[in-house]
Amino acid sequence: MVVSEPGPPPNKAGECYTKVMLPAELRAEPVQQVVKAAGERNEYSEAVYQDAEERVVVKPASKRVTVVPAEYGQVEEKVLIREAYRREIEVPALYNTYYEKAMNKPARDVWKPGRGTVEKIDPTTGEILCLVHEDATYKTVERKELFRAASKRYEDVPAEYATVKKTVLKKPESVREVEIPAEYQTIKVRKLVKAPEPVKVAVAPEYATVNKQVMVKPEHAEWTQVLCDVNATPAKVQQVERALKSRGYPVQVDGQIDPQLTDSIRSFQQKSGLHATGLMTADTLAKLGVQLK
């Protein structure tokens, strides 16, 4: 394909242009297109049926297995509750108790305040004291004497039994087969009298309206105004980066023209309906609100 070349770039002071390749411009035009070619299809004539009565098996004959439960009965049985054993019994010791009179306090003579046959004066208090005789006092003392020492004796305790009722099997469980006859029913059925016959039928072609891409303008080169190198200062590039960043594009505001900035400009151009060149063109800067100069 031969690509048309543009003439010389515009010669205006302070403006810079670059040649960019623009894709062909297409337009969708509706056209009629065959979506299904003409042909033939096989059809069948209607079948002929006749109503009739027929006796059918609803449920076939079968056998049912019935379980005859086991039979149980109650019997009485003597069971051991506790075995016989020999029990040891402690026989305590026996004592004889004796009561004896024992002197608790012997007889004595003591000086007490008062007058009597024999008197004296207390040198400390000057009180008159008389000599009084006190009889001896006695108390009853209990004394135990071993009559029979402690011992052990043994006693045989018989076993204990109880009568309990116990369930025993009289007749074990068994199975029995029961014959179940078949079940029939008379129903109305439609019997085929004449089978369908094949018939060929012509089928017309089918059309549909589709959009066909028609070239309006072929691929061509064009001069586009861009930011001049002398104007592409770090400060100017930062203005572009800030404008892109405020619109959510992942760029670093560092004043450097790098692949990340170029990709972000291209994405913005595609979204804005501009030619996606990745260059800082005049149209792009105008959309971003950044002055060209």
Image (tube, rainbow, N blue to C red):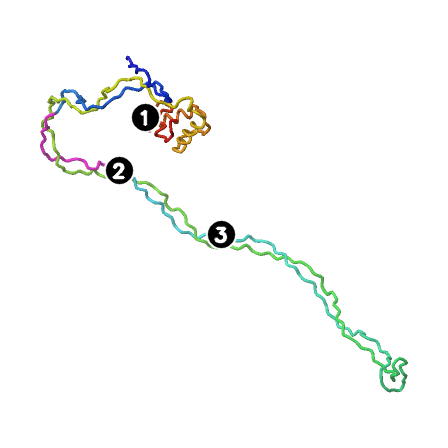
Find the residue positioned furthest to the top.
2
Residue 166 drawn at (x, y percent): 43, 51
Identify the image quadrant of residue 103. Answer: bottom right
Residue 214 drawn at (x, y percent): 22, 20
Q: Nearer the viewer, mark 3 or mark 2?
A: 2
Q: Nearer the viewer, mark 2 or mark 1?
A: 1
Q: Which residue is mark 2?
A: 63
Residue 206, placed above or below residue 91: above
Q: Nearer the viewer, mark 1 or mark 3?
A: 1
Could you say whether the residue bearing mark 1 is in a helix, strand or loop? loop
> Which residue is at a point 90% across and 80% down the rendered structure image?
123
24 with respect to 97 (left or right): left
In the image, 15 versus 80, the foreground residue is 15
> Which residue is at a point 72% across and 66% down the rendered structure image?
95
Could you say whether the residue bearing mark 2 is in a helix, strand or loop? strand
In the image, 147 versus 236, the foreground residue is 236
Mark 2: few, some, or many residues within 10 Å (few <14, many ≥20)?
few
Q: Which residue is mark 1?
A: 274
Q: Earlier in the sequence, mark 3 or mark 2?
A: 2
In space, the residues marked 2 and 1 are separated at their CA atoms by 87 Å
Q: Quadrant of the N terminus?
A: top left
Q: Amino acid at mark 3?
A: Val
Q: Which residue is mark 3?
A: 79
The residues colored magenta run 44-61
In the image, 76 versus 178, the foreground residue is 178
Taking the magenta stretch, the answer to whether it contains residue 52 is: yes
